Amino acid sequence: MNQTWQDITLALSGIVLAVGQVEKLAKTGFVDTAQFELCVKALLNTSPDNTRELFESTEVDLSAIFEQVEALLKDYRHPKHVDTLKYTLGVLHIQNKMMQNKKMLYSIGNKLNDAQKKVEHFGLTHDNVVAFIAQTYTDTISTLPYRIQVNGEYGYLQQQRVANQIRTLLLCAIRFATLWRQVGGKKWHFLFYKKHLLQQAHTLCLDYKRLP
């Protein structure tokens, strides 16, 4: 059961990682390049051997991500967590709606295959690749009745580069939300099994701090 809770916590951490970058982009106009690359790589890896495979990175301090998840779980109501929590719950809601739309799932799957081909030609986070993934989000997820309202500086949100990166990261977050469901994650875990999530986030933090 601990392995299941670890997988659930890893998937949750992926969502928090992606929406955390959305928040940073919207408010500063900048993104952490290494974290952005990890998210896009995870998005395009549709058949990982295990959950940890999606977090393979020599550039990202993953222990800091798990610390962020710990802090969020300990105090949902803290003002600094407002946007992260809102985006996380929004992503889980959208992912649930997406799974009910088989046509949309098929379209996204095909587009991600096309994106992978572009990666082979341009590179993982080339502007052309990011723009293509962002357009995929616009053509599919953005057509759902519910939309995530991103809070930030108007000047940044109006920049095409920032808009493309935000849409790409939201699709990455939805990918992690899909993983969350696949490994057994449920919304009510936040209320009734928070202790398990906290314990695993702390353990993961310590594990990744020990890695060279």
Image (cartoon, helix red, strand yellow):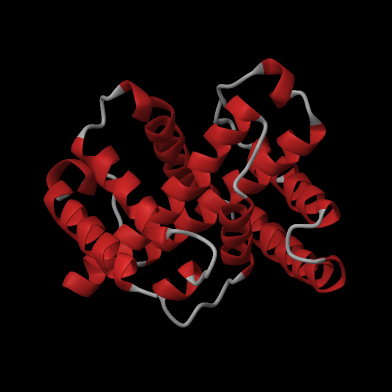
Measured as percent of width and height from the top left, residue 11 is found at: 39, 59
Q: Among all residues in the image, which is located at the extreme front?
A: 212
Please name whichever residue, 89 or 144, is drawn nearer the observer in this view of the structure.
89
Please name whichever residue, 28 or 55, is drawn nearer the observer in this view of the structure.
28
Within the image, what quadrant is residue 120 found in?
Answer: bottom right
Q: Which quadrant of the rendered structure holds the C terminus?
A: bottom left
Horizontal placement of 129 versus 102: left or right? right
Horizontal placement of 111 versus 204: left or right? right
**Residue 12 visible in the current orientation:** no
Residue at 27%, 69% (x, y): give it.
Answer: 207
Within the image, what quadrant is residue 34 found in?
Answer: bottom right
**Residue 121 visible in the current orientation:** yes
Horizontal placement of 104 versus 115: left or right? left
Measured as percent of width and height from the top left, residue 60 is found at: 50, 60
Horizontal placement of 194 versus 121: left or right? left
Q: Among all residues in the image, which is located at the extreme bottom?
A: 49
Residue at 71%, 58% (x, y): give it.
Answer: 107
Within the image, what quadrant is residue 160 found in?
Answer: top right
Residue at 13%, 45% (x, y): give it.
Answer: 192
Please name whichever residue, 151 or 28, is drawn nearer the observer in this view of the structure.
28
Residue at 61%, 53% (x, y): give it.
Answer: 36
Q: Which quadrant of the rendered structure holds the N terminus?
A: bottom left
